[in-house]
Image (cartoon, helix red, strand yellow):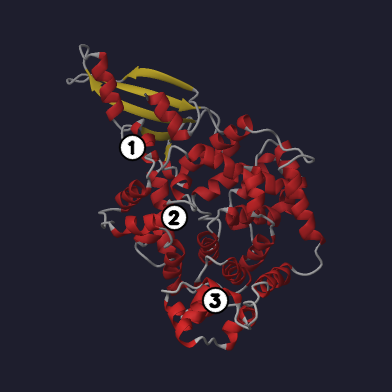
Amino acid sequence: RIRRGMRDLVFGEPGSIGLDFEEPTETGNTWRLRATHPPASALKMQEGSELVAINRVRVTERTPRSEVARRISSRPVSLTFRLPKSNKEVPNSEIFPMVVSEIVVSELREGLLPLKTAQPPLSTALQKHQEVKARKEPQHLHQAARILNSVQCWGTMPGSTVPAWVEDLRVDSPLGKQWAKTASLDLFAREPGLLFRVLMFCGEASTLCFAGRSCSTWQKLLLDTAQRSSRQLWSWVLRHGQSISSPQRPNFWHWCCRSGEGLQRAASVQEEADSPEESLLEAAARCDASGSLSRLSSGLGGAAPSLEVATGSMQKLAKALGLQRLPSKVLDGLLQDPWHCQRLWLLSDAALPWLVMQCRYFQVVIAAHLPNLFRHMMGEGLAPELFYCRWIQGLFQGCLSVELQLRIMDHFIFERSLKIFVKLAVAIFTSLEKRLIGQDIEKMMDLIFDPKVWEIDDEQLMKETVGVKVTRSMLKEIQ
């Protein structure tokens, strides 16, 4: 039972498992089942260190084996990390992401084929990267031209000057009723490309919000993100313009997360929990239609070892927003598809294969964008995916300034994809490439583990991030 629980806990078979007795007591002996994981030297764990999952139950000599098994399965597992010599214990919140990263990368190496330059998916990523490098015009101008061309392709209704998008209006919608009554549109509604051009020139996400709320016609054109062109406009402004202001950000995230009847129904029944841990677990249970959290915790006597790490990430995110805790509808949304924070925060039994695939995405992209650095790190026995897996578990908290982290979260939540994190990690390694090339493993780890010495400007890092070429079609091909 503990072996299976340990496998679910750290996503890898433990190195050893044993049954020990502690000192006898008047009420009986304490059985201590200990599963240890081998040292993870690549993550600065000293040799001789061990991760220990302990399950303690009290039994007597006459306790039936069936009762012993029942008590073992109903008791939570205590996860600790012990250093050699000093026997000092490191908090779970610090060591757990490192251990998970080590095992995820091990699973990636054992379960997936090595990358080859002439074969997909690396060949496809290299081709996309070369296309971007060969492009003469700046990326933001290229993307702006594509958006305006897509709007121009909307065209007009046959035999009239009425824009074609009017045909898609629902008859019972407010705008549909208005059109049926007056059959008139303002100049910008008749020429959406002109409206888009003006808003791109302004380059402020707040202006997009205010413009979309000014009238029902513009609301349809700007806030109906079911339209591809509207989504592209928002993405362009978030990347190259001024992002959402801090007071508006919680409402913006709520707007991005509100789609889906299941989400609305789940959020409507939420009750305020007594603690952040209870709040997160209740939200995860509500949003978990498949029961993956129950299956994971059942092997651990009802425990959720990653809860401390997940709660810490959630609280830091709320603090960055200036709130005591995340709004319930935002939290419920992030835990579900397509954001998948339930898997990201290891509150699902499907987290292992999902995390392996996220690291594979990053591995392909960094190999395409930074081939020299990738070969050097792999040659030194240091997989860059280790750091990416560790960073995303905490949503890059501790690696970025608060403002930049919130801007990255704006992209993540609006675009409904973790590709922004892949791009961000590649941008970080791009900024550090010259300082990493030629260094041994110890010096590289000293640099990567200490964000305070990176000395990367926020604006430059954001520019590098949006310049990394990652598309949904690329990710699908890798998968």
Closer to the chain start, of discs 2 and 1, is 1
In depth, the one of 436 and 131 nearer the eye is 131
Q: Is residue 344 above or below residue 302?
A: below
Number of numbered callouts drawn:
3
Residue 360 spot, x, y in % from top left: 62, 42
Let me know if residue 215 appears in the view: no
Residue most toward the left? 26
**What amino acid is labelled 2 in the image?**
Leu
SS of the residue under disc 3: helix
In depth, the one of 199 and 63 nearer the eye is 199
Work out which quarter of the rendered image holds the N terminus and state it: top left
Q: Is residue 206 above or below residue 44?
A: below
Which numbered disc covers residue 334? 2
In depth, the one of 23 and 230 nearer the eye is 230
Residue 309 spot, x, y in % from top left: 42, 47
Work out which quarter of the rendered image holds the C terminus and state it: top right
Which numbered disc covers residue 166? 3
Q: Quadrant of residue 445?
A: top right
Answer few, some or many: residues within 10 Å of disc 1's Cα (few below 14, many 20 plus, some between 14 and 19).
some
Closer to the chain start, of discs 3 and 1, is 3
Which numbered disc covers residue 401? none
The residue at 50%/75% (across/down) is: 220
CA gap between label 2 and label 1 equals 22 Å
The residue at 44%/32% (across/down) is: 8
Question: Which callout, 2 or 1, points to the residue nearer the camera?
Answer: 2
Q: Quadrant of residue 32?
A: top left
**What amino acid is labelled 3 in the image?**
Val
436 sits to left or right of 307 = right
The residue at 72%/52% (across/down) is: 433
CA gap between label 3 and label 2 equals 33 Å
326 sits to left or right of 376 = left
**What amino acid is labelled 1 in the image?**
Ala
